[in-house]
Amino acid sequence: MKVFSLKEMLAYPYEERDKNVFFKSPEFKTRIIALAPGEKLPDCEMKSHVIFYIISGHAEYTINGESGELTEGQCLISEPGDYSISTRTGVKILGIQIHKK
């Protein structure tokens, strides 16, 4: 067992995203994602279920053609598919990727 302080964790830029993974097991991996105001993650295809929890800030998403917004304290759980996440004001996200068995 290990306790993590998500609000205090630092996040590296997208180019160094592997450094943002802070826990990894055969079943899932967790990472911190931080976007500055006006930033967007590159669009990607996820082959597994993903959980996003907004630690702070506000994000816009499009997943499998469905768009919406997330604010601090909200959690989105999604099936595999095409993902896009951006922010106008800045956001810090906990991302959990569930591995298929």
Image (tube, grey):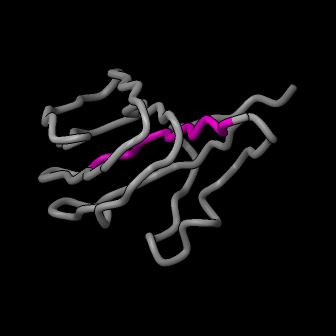
The residue lying at 36 percent from left, 44 percent from top is: 81
**What is the magenta segment's predominant secondary structure?**
strand
In this view, which residue lies farthest toward the front? 101
- State yes or no: residue 95 in magenta: yes
- Image position of 26 with respect to 14: above or below: above
Q: Quadrant of the N terminus?
A: top right
The residue lying at 75 percent from left, 34 percent from top is: 27
The residue lying at 70 percent from left, 49 percent from top is: 22
- State yes or no: residue 83 in magenta: no
The residue lying at 48 percent from left, 36 percent from top is: 50
Residue 37: x, y in percent?
Answer: 19, 59
Is 44 on the left or on the right of 49, as rendered? left
Is 100 on the left or on the right of 67, as rendered? right
Residue 83: x, y in percent?
Answer: 31, 49
Is 69 on the left or on the right of 97, as rendered? left
- Image position of 84 with respect to 49: above or below: below
Residue 77: x, y in percent?
Answer: 41, 25
- Magenta highlight range: 91-100
